[in-house]
Image (cartoon, rainbow, N blue to C red):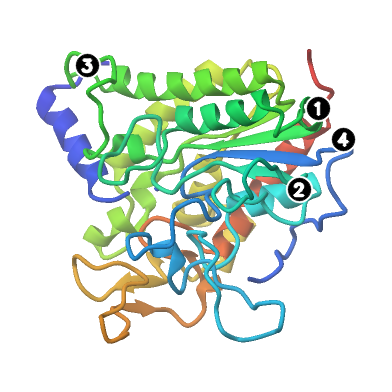
Amino acid sequence: MKLMPTVFCLLLVVLALGGARVEARGTPSADQGSKNQWSSMFVFGDGFVDNGNLPKTDTWRQWSYPYGSYLNSRGSATPVPTGRLSNYWIQSDFIARILGLSEAPPSYRLTPHLSCDPSGMTFAFGGAGVYEVPDKKVPTLATQVNAFTRLLNTGVISKQQLQSSVALVSISGSDYMTGANVDNAFLSSFDDIDSYIGNVTTEIAKNVGKQQRLGVRKVLVNNMHPIGCTPLRTSANNYTTCDLLANYAATVHNNNIEHLMGNKNNAHILDLYTAFTDIVNHAPGEGSEQSNNFKRKLTPCCEASTELGYCGQVSPSGKRLYNLCKNPDKNFYLDETYPTTAGWEAVTEALEEPLREFLDRDYVP
C-alpha cells in the first residue's frame, strides 16, 4: 500500500510525539508454572521488559521515584528504585511467574562478570528497537542478541541451561519515532510505510530465528500494543480518545509479525494489541473483565508539571515536578507510555491461557 509522502510524514510526526509492589492477584505463584520445566528465561527488547540495564543517572527516569519502588527486606517504607519502568513489576516479571520463576531474571548490567543466574538474564534496555535511536544510545535488539551469543559461546551460559529456556522479545515502538536512525533501514525513501514497517518486523523475526538456532527452546514475541491509546497520544484529546493513525501503524506492524511468525514452530505471539484494547479502548458494554478494574484507562497516574518535564523529575532543591495519583491500581498507565503494575497484571491475565497452552506443547526439533 502506497502512501503519499505528506501522509507518511504525518504518521512519523504522530509517532514521534512520544516514546515505548504487590503480589499479582490472579497471577500464579512461582510453584504453579507450566507442566514443562522452564527454569531459565532470557529477555530482550525495550522498556516493557527492562529491569535495570539502563545506568543510574539523572538521564533515566526509571531510577527515580515512583518507578520500580518496593519495600526492602527490612520492611522499610522508603521506596527503592529497581530500574523498572512501572511502579513495581513489569511484563517480564509476570511472564516469569507463569514459567514458575519468582520474578524476571537479573539484568545483564547488574549480573556479576562472567556469570549467569540460573533463572537466566535480561538483556533488554528501555528505549531500544531494531534500529539505533541516537538520542537514547541503547543497544539494538541485534546487539542484545549478540551479547547473549557471546555469553553462550564462552560457556557463561551453558547449552544445558538452554534446554529448559524460554526467551521473551519486546519491541514496542521506538523504531517508529523520528529519532530512530533509519539511514540503514534499506529504504530509498519514506513513501512506503509498509516497506519500512516490514523491515522492522523482518529484523524482529530474524533475531527470533537466531535465538532458536542457538538453542532457545521456546520464544515469546510481543506484537505491537495500541500505541495510539498511550496517554502521550490521548493527551491531545484530554485523555478521552485514542489516536487512530498511530493505532493503524500498530496494526500494520502486527499483520507483518503474524505473517512472519504465525507458523513458526516453538514461537508464540503475545497479543498485546487485543489485551490492551479490551481494557482501554473497547466499545461500550464490551471489553474484558479486567477493564472494570480501572477508573482511568487513558489517563496517566504520573504526569509532569511542565510541558517539557517528565514523571519522576525533581528540581535541584528536591521538589517534585510532577503530579502523582493516589492509587496507581486504578490507572492502567503509570506515565505517558508505560502501564502500571496493575495494568500489566490485567494484560497478563488476558494472555495467560493461550500462553500456557503454548508452553505445555512439546518442543518441535
Residue type beneath disc 1: Gln
Count residues near mark 2 (Cα–Cα under 10 Å), then give few for <14, some for 14-19, many for 20+: many
Mark 4 to mark 3 CA distance (whole Å): 46 Å
Mark 3 to mark 2 CA distance (whole Å): 42 Å
User: Is the residue 302 above or below the residue 142 in the image?
Assistant: below
Foreground disc of the pair 1, 4 = 1
Q: Secondary structure at mark 1?
A: loop
Q: Is residue 17 toward the left or the right of residue 325 in the image?
A: left
Q: Secondary structure at mark 4?
A: loop
Q: Give the labeled residue for mark 2.
A: 98
Foreground disc of the pair 4, 3 = 4
Q: Give the labeled residue for mark 4.
A: 36
Q: Give the labeled residue for mark 3.
A: 2
Q: Position of residue 218 (x, y in %)?
A: 71, 28
User: Is the residue 318 above or below the residue 300 in the image?
Assistant: below
Question: Which residue is nearer to you in this view: 187 or 297?
Answer: 187
